[in-house]
């Protein structure tokens, strides 16, 4: 069983607006609301790939109920801590003409200390029976920036591998706690290391530098340019096939789901990264976030290129 952690789930609302501009009024050509937040997207893709998955984190209010119903519908086991506030909504405006994506992410509700402690106890129990754990995204108000450090330590004590996909202070604190794997994107690594990464050589150096913290797999994702993966076997570049992009929102989450499933199935890291790449690319072909089809993933997998750097 794989466990996914989403501390700050969201109802992801996307609008397709051709020729979107700041400061004007537009009518959406298409709108869509799905259960989202990074870890929920990971959960949906793991389920599509055919693995059993339990989802945990915090949920509250009507949005929380909507997310739990959507996950129940697809057969995900839910083990969320119910909070008093309302789960957030995040907005993405997708403009296929200018090929831009504008996102407005709410901070999320307030979570009391009592609920944080309940969550940690529950996480401790769940991580005893789940040997692969993904933890993704920001945390809502009231949750300490050290939360992922605590989760990494609990997972390690229980013999579970934790894959972390977060940013900012959460990531900067967590890298020192030696998670099993991290998957920042290029911008997130630039912030973390406080320098620009000009080319593939500099990204490779950054991945190796992060690996030095004691992280087994460092994967830096680069959107349509693929990803750089540093692991015990060496440093690899994964290049995805070219596709017609609808929306890459949630591609990072789909990539994490592919990695979690590959590792769960005992694949070597390069094969897990090929599956991850196919999932990230498959997600970008649709407007929905955290949505892939098995047919697309199978087809794309055969067209991912791998280079040893
Ligand atoms: N336009 C695209 N074309 C092909 N593959 C893509 C595209 N965008 C993302 N991907 C795939 O998804 C992965 C994760 O996407 P990325 O945008 O880097 O993550 P994040 O959403 O975390 O910023 C990439 O490494 C790549 O394999
Ligand atoms: O938890 P955060 O960091 O605020 O991010 C939340 C947002 O990230 C997303 O998961 C998209 O993430 P990616 O495009 O990085 O995969 C949205 O679905 C969600 O609304």
Image (tube, helix red, strand yellow):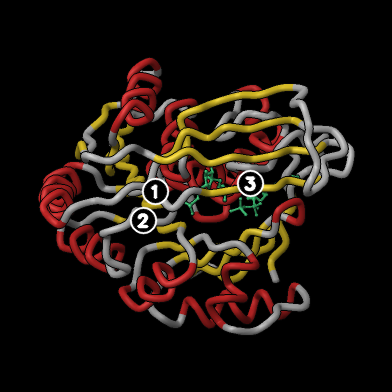
Residue underneath mark 2? 139
Q: Residue at x 76, y 33 (%)?
A: 246
Q: Dot 2: within a 10 Å radius of its alpha carbon, few (fewer than 14), some, or many (20 or more) residues?
A: many
For residue 277, which numbered disc appears in the image? 3
In this rendering, the count of numbered labels is 3
Q: Which of the 4 quarters of the picture holds residue 85?
A: top left
Left or right of 27? Residue 41 is left
Disc nearer the start of the sequence (2/1): 1
Choose the circle earlier in sequence order: 2 or 3.
Answer: 2
Q: Residues within 10 Å of mark 1 (few under 14, many from 20)?
A: many
The answer to the question of whether label 2 and label 1 lie on touching residues, with beta carbons closer than 8 A, is yes
Q: Residue furthest top?
A: 73
Query: Mark 1 highlights which residue?
Result: 108
Residue ID at (21%, 66%): 153
Mark 3 CB within 8 Å of ligand 1: yes
Q: Nearer the viewer, residue 1 or 148?
A: 148
Q: Position of residue 229 (x, y in %)?
A: 58, 64
Taking the spot 33% from the left edge, 31% from the top edge, the residue there is 64
Residue 18 position (above or below residue 140): above
Mark 2: secondary structure: loop
Seen from the viewer's position, the closer of residues 53 and 26 is 26
Is the residue at mark 1 in contact range of ligand 2, meaning its CB lies under 8 Å from it?
yes
| Image quadrant in which you'd find residue 278 | top right
Return the x and y of residue 186 as percentages of the image width and height.
Answer: 65, 67
Give 202 or 189, whichever is nearer the viewer.
189
Instruction: Check disc 1 and report its element: helix, strand or loop.
Output: loop
Q: Is residue 108 visible?
A: yes
């Amino acid at each position: 069983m794989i466990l996914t952690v989403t501390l700050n789930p969201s109802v992801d609302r996307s609008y397709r607006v051709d020729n979107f501009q700041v400061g004007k009024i537009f009518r959406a050509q298409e709108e869509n609301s799905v259960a989202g937040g990074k870890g929920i997207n990971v959960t949906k893709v793991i389920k599509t790939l055919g693995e059993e998955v339990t989802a945990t984190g915090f949920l509250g209010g009507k949005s929380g109920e909507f997310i739990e119903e959507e996950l129940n519908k697809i057969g995900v086991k839910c083990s969320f801590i119910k909070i008093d506030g309302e789960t957030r909504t995040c907005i993405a405006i997708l403009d296929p003409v200018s090929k831009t994506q504008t996102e407005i992410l709410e901070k999320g509700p307030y979570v009391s200390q009592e609920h944080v402690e309940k969550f940690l106890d529950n996480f401790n129990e769940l991580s005893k029976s789940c040997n692969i754990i993904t933890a993704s995204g920001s945390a809502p108000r009231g949750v300490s920036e050290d939360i992922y450090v605590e989760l990494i330590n609990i997972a390690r004590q229980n013999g579970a591998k934790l894959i972390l996909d977060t940013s900012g202070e959460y990531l900067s604190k967590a890298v020192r706690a030696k998670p099993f794997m991290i998957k920042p994107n290029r911008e997130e690594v630039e912030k973390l290391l406080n320098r620009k990464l000009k080319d593939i050589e500099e990204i490779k150096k950054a991945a190796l530098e992060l690996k030095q913290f004691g992280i087994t797999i460092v994967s830096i994702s680069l959107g349509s340019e693929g990803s750089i993966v540093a692991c015990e076997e060496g440093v690899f570049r994964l290049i995805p096939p070219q596709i017609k992009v609808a929306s890459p929102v949630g591609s990072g989450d789909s990539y994490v789901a592919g990695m979690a499933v590959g590792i769960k199935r005992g694949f070597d890291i390069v094969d897990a990264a090929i599956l991850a790449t196919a999932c990230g690319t498959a997600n970008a072909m649709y407007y929905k976030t955290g949505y892939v089809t098995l047919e697309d993933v199978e087809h794309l997998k055969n067209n991912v290129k791998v280079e040893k750097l």
